[in-house]
Image (cartoon, coloured by chain):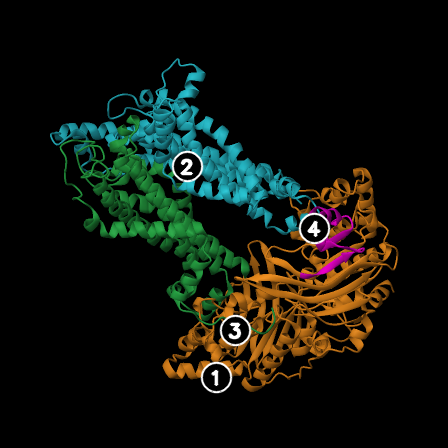
Amino acid sequence: MSDSAIVTPPESLVRRSLKGLRGAPPTAIVGLVIVTAYILVAALAPWIAPYGEYQVVSDMPFAPWSSENLLGTDQLGRDFLTRIIYGARNSIGIALVTTVLAFAIGGFFGIMAAALRGWADQILSRFVDAVMSIPDLILTLMLLAIFGPAVVNLILIIAVLDSTRIFRISRAAAMNVVTLDFVEAASARGEGLTWRIVHEILPNILPILISEFGMRFCFVFLMIAALSFLGVGLQPPMAEWGSMVRDNAALINMGDITPLIPAGAIALLTVGVNFVADWFLGKSSGLADDE
Amino acid sequence: MTGTSILASGSHPILNMTVQRLGLGLLSLAIVSAIIFTAVSFLPGDFATAILGRSATPETVAAFQQKLGLDKPWPQRYVDWLGGALVGDFGDSFSSRLVSTVIGPRLANTLALAATTAVIAVPLAVFLGIVCARYRNKPVDRFLSSATLASISLPEFFIAYVLMLVLATKLHIFPSLSSIRPGMGLGEHLYRMALPIMTLLFVTLAHMMRNTRAALIGVMSRPYIEMARLKGEPEMRIVLRHALPNAIGPIASVIAINLAYLIAGVVVVEVVFVYPGIGQTMVDAVRNRDVPVVQACALIFSAAYIVLNLIADIISIVSNPRLLHPR
Amino acid sequence: MTNELSVVAAGDTVLSISDLRIEARVKDEWLEIVKGVSLTLRRGEVLGLVGESGAGKSTIGLAALGYFRAGCRLAGGSVRFGGTDLLAMPESRRRALRGTKIAYVAQSAAASFNPAKRLMDQIVEAAVTRGGMPRRDAAARAVALFRSLQLPDPERFGDRYPHQVSGGQLQRAMTAMAMICQPDLIVFDEPTTALDVTTQVEVLLSIRKAIQEHGVAVLYISHDLAIVAQMAHRVMVLRYGEAVEEAPIASIIDAPRHPYTKSLWAVRNLQGASHAATGDDLLRVEQISASYGTFKALDGIDLAVGRGQTVALVGESGSGKSTLGRVIAGLLPPDGGTLRFDGAVLPPVVRKRGKDMLRRVQIIYQSADTALNPRHSVRKILGRPLAFFHGLSGAQRERRVLELLRMVELEESYADRLPAQLSGGQRQRVAIARALAAEPELIICDEITSALDQIVQAGILTMLADLQRRLGVSYLFITHDIEVVRAIADRVVVLNKGRIVDQGAKADVLSPPFQDYTRLLLESVPEMTPDWLDRLVERRAA
């Protein structure tokens, strides 16, 4: 380029994000609307649900749709709609906690491996390779068989397993940054490891990690739903979409679509998140292309 | 690494790399089997009580520990277990039946399901991936990309139940449950597998197609593709003759990696359609915490996955011109 | 094939571009990057397109094939080839012309050949699939071209894969690929830029011979006017997508009309004043050897840098010059040998050097794009060494940051900017300021001007000389560019394959009698006269 710089005036975060939204494809807008709606439902569950999470409202199991129970009742006579609303809270909350934990573990070790290299990197990377050569669901099932399906175990097992992917992503991203001259310049200056990680490496890989968050959340969310559906994930009486499908699946054979509603709720959220995440990923890689 | 190359020095680098990769494959099989086996040692202390019930006496607990082999040293137990596993003997399950009799008859069913799906999904995924890369950002590509993005977002059981509701309950085209009995004819077998296979295709095909497309598009951004355009080559020829030969390795490895979705899908689908395979066996064993059965299933699934990835690795090596034609 | 195109007679106009306008997408806007360029090219004529990065030369070169890269689009104008407008015809007809009537030679042959296919298959592809030539005839013609381009073993050269052939040979193979269908027009886009100077001479000679033998019209693109002077009859100088001046080659060099044209050889015009060494040596490198794995990068290096002096370390790529810089900076532990700084032994790795030792030796990198953290403001970039080495904070530090900016001739307001908001030259100035912030005695400059345009290079070199006068700092100046050495060095050290082959005062090394390798290096550097290549050939023949 020429020696006259292109100067973009500093913009506020809000204005920038509004500007970014304007160019968003329709899929991303739809995704954003879906995600926002789910978050609202999850946050406001106790106020918008017609009944209590565990409250048995009918002595008839599998009651049909009616004015009292808009979506009927489940196998124990609890209000189906209420269970779905609370399910949003439980399913999303637990998946979110697990994903955050996975990012903390995977991100920490990934960056350390890239920054330290040598034997520390070798050990961590070979360990991750070994864990990743077992299909996720299979390893999760085995660990659940051993440790039992308590919520804490479920969160820890999935977080640790998913952290191996985040380890790879953050290690690869950090490796690209570590080899850049400004990190070497900091080493040549005599800066310590912590300073180099916090000031030189982290700010440069954060955008990559953030754009991966949506995809990883979907993966964790689907994994928990699948496990609950298989009956080895979140346990009753907690309202959870996966187990609601399982417990009411018999209705499908009678041509009743009620059990598909929680399954659809899972599907809609992951589609929404994926649409947003896909746009995000495309945007961040597209920006990289320009440079 | 240096060890192997010294050993094989003078021979062709392809052979070299292949032997190396096979060695690595065996090593990861060993590590994975060790992980799966060692997991038993992490059983919580109250596990025996949990399995045997509160009334268990110290004697029954000790007998149980012995049955698990926890009284013998670790290396011996591991060698015994692995040696048994190699000849199909996984010892006793907690339900006192031989693990092999629990799994044996169902393994073939699962293999039939997974193999049939893979045979349809892999060529179709590669074909659609090529179509998307050729017509990148054209309507076909945009449609397939959005459709597959939606499809990978859906939980397997959602697809399974929608198919069941529409094709079985409403339209009565296929049976809603896939009960398979020994001695059933091939046609009958396939007919009953139809819904599970369709469900699995939805999920795996989408993953594989997206990754094939990405691998090809990665190659399409290389300067030699622009050179081919500047030589006036038609776009289809560029994709098939210039990009594809360079994308074989990447495509093989993404497809192998995506077989993990097939394995996970198999487990869920078997449960939904009550298909008698080892996926369902494994889930039941997890619920009953029948660890020997779980271990056996985990080893079978992992070994299959590792071997498939190994094959993909070797395909990438063999299709790499730099290795095929050394300086 | 289109008949009207194949009857282009000698001296006829082959290509005529008029008022060509091309836009490129930057973020969400379309900016004009080629602003109404017009040119004509006749059969047998070579037109040079010269300009610095971002001038739009490659974009114009590709437009001559009716081709636009992704993210670029036509905004107006016409490209007439043999009388027909390429831009108005359907893509299928344009495609039929590419490779057969209009051919292209890319900058990086190593990346532009398909690694999965034999060279012969790629070279004859257009001739066989669309030129209607039997494969046997096409292969025979390719072998004849290999021979005329002086490729080794022409009969079997085509059996090889791209990775089995050297960079210089690949570039000639690409020229053969362009000529296989005897096109009317060839676009050469910086064909020798990726090569070392000594390899470049051979490739230039082969290309020129081939052009002369076939009497084809050529558009020759380069950033280096000295190279274009050897190849072209006429030159068009481009800047920011506009033609600055167009003239026959001799008059461009002898009587440039536009000041920008003259700035294209700005570094050549710099006259550096020599400093005699004052007192002791600041840095002594004694018997240093280093390696990457089993590859020996440096072997028994001995050199000294005097206080307030500039020592230039010259060599081609792979000579080990940057490795030596990294060893001195403590980033790569040497296999053996000693470093002495100001009389004391310098520990081999950064960790073992005290903070004050680290402060006294600083390093500046070739690419300021990667040497500055893109997420830090200039204030933070300059502030950190001030805090780290001198414990400055608050108003004191701020005052010093602004002082440093003035030292490198940047405005104080730049402190708030991020590196992406600066130009390449400004970024390199910030990197220099960061090194100066430590108040060092020795600065290792690793190719710090090679990524910059001539006029910007000249500005930075002048500033460095000025800073040296004021601060008494020493430079170890690593470069491959003899013109930069002439402009700035007091002493010169010539490196080849990890060994020192020549060293001494600048006047001794760069004037006769020459050491063999130094002579090869010096005579391979293109000179700003049209007959440099001819004289070189004569000298070598003699």
Residue A100 x/y as whole percent: 32, 52
Judging by the rendered image, the residue that carries numbered circle 2 is B261
Label 2 resides on the chain identified as B
- Of badges 2 and 3, the one in the foreground is 2
Are circles 2 and 1 on residues that touch, CB within 8 Å?
A: no
Judging by the rendered image, the residue that carries numbered circle 3 is C431
Co-location on one chain, circles 2 and 3: no
Judging by the rendered image, the residue that carries numbered circle 1 is C403
Co-location on one chain, circles 4 and 3: no
Residue C45 x/y as whole percent: 83, 61
Density class for disc 1 (Cα within 10 Å; few <14, some 14-19, many ≥20) is: some
Note the chain letter of the green one: A
Q: Is residue C79 magenta?
A: yes
The CA span between labels 2 and 4 is 40 Å
Local secondary structure at mark 4: helix
Q: Amino acid at mark 4?
A: Leu
Query: Which residue: 54% across, 84% down?
Result: C471
Local secondary structure at mark 1: helix
Q: Amino acid at mark 2?
A: Tyr
Quadrant in the picture for residue A54: top left
Residue C410 x/y as whole percent: 53, 80
Q: Amino acid at mark 1?
A: Glu
Are circles 4 and 3 on residues that touch, CB within 8 Å?
A: no
Judging by the rendered image, the residue that carries numbered circle 4 is B230
Note the chain letter of the cyan one: B
- Of badges 4 and 3, the one in the foreground is 4
- Of badges 2 and 4, the one in the foreground is 4
